[in-house]
Amino acid sequence: MADTHERDRPGTPPGLKLPQDIIDEYAAGGIDLTALFSAGHLGTRMGIEITEASADRVTGTMPVEGNTQPYGLLHGGASAVLAETLGSVGAMLHGRSTKIAVGVDLNCTHHRGLSTGTVTGVATPVHRGRTTTSHEIVITDEQGRRVCTARLTCLLRDAPAAARQDTPSA
């Protein structure tokens, strides 16, 4: 397994850890991993931060404040966005730079409501194949209590030719 290093670039979430071979592979193709790991404008608006990323485990956080439904509880859709973001990053890291991950099924079970604090999600692979991946995502509160359990299946499609790069064979 590759060494994991802290990213020092401006705009990178604090503490983001990435395998060095992944950093090198994407940088060679001119791909901004920070943008890929941010969930885009939606992730930024929701305050999602990826704190650890590898094909084996992706971890991220999201504040409850600003992501609530009218009753003041964490919105189930916000948990779904966090889950899909983390699982998609795991799928993308499995597929490497020659594939793109497209979510095709997301299932969320919400276990408890929260009105304050930060939630943490951890995505771990259940299946990693050539054309699909499935991840379980467990979202917990600051006391480690399960808030949501999700499962995401992604289709791995060939990356567009402009984004594709040759990857060294092992």
Image (spheres, rainbow, N blue to C red):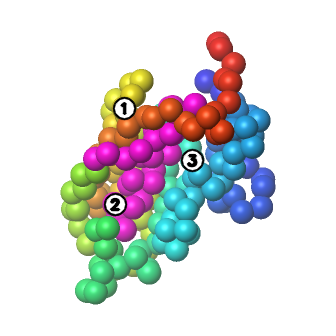
Secondary structure at badge 3 equals strand
- Residue at image coords 28%, 68%: 76
On residue 52, which mark appears? 3
Q: Is residue 12 visible?
A: yes
Q: Is the magenta stretch mostly helix, strand or loop?
A: helix
The reply to whether dot 1 and dot 3 touch (C-beta < 8 Å) is no
Q: How far apart are marks 1 and 3 (CA)?
A: 22 Å
- Considering only vertical position in the picture, is 88 above or below 170? below
Q: Distance between the residues labelled 1 and 2?
A: 19 Å
Image quarter hosting the N terminus: top right
Q: Where is residue 104 in the image (x, y as percent from the top left)?
A: 32, 45
The reply to whether dot 1 and dot 2 touch (C-beta < 8 Å) is no
On residue 5, which mark appears? none
Specify which label sits upstream in the sequence, 1 or 3.
3
Specify which label sits upstream in the sequence, 1 or 2.
2
> How many residues crowd mark 1 within 10 Å: few (<14), some (14–19), many (20+)?
some
Determine whether, in the image, residue 9 is placed left or right of residue 50: right
- Residue at image coords 68%, 24%: 166
The residue to which callout 2 is attached is 80
Q: Which amino acid does label 2 sit on?
A: Ala
Q: What residue type is labelled 1?
A: Thr
Q: Which amino acid does label 3 sit on?
A: Glu
> How many residues crowd mark 2 within 10 Å: few (<14), some (14–19), many (20+)?
many
Determine whether, in the image, residue 94 is placed left or right of residue 145: right
Q: Nearer the viewer, mark 1 or mark 2?
A: 1
Residue 162: quarter of image: top right
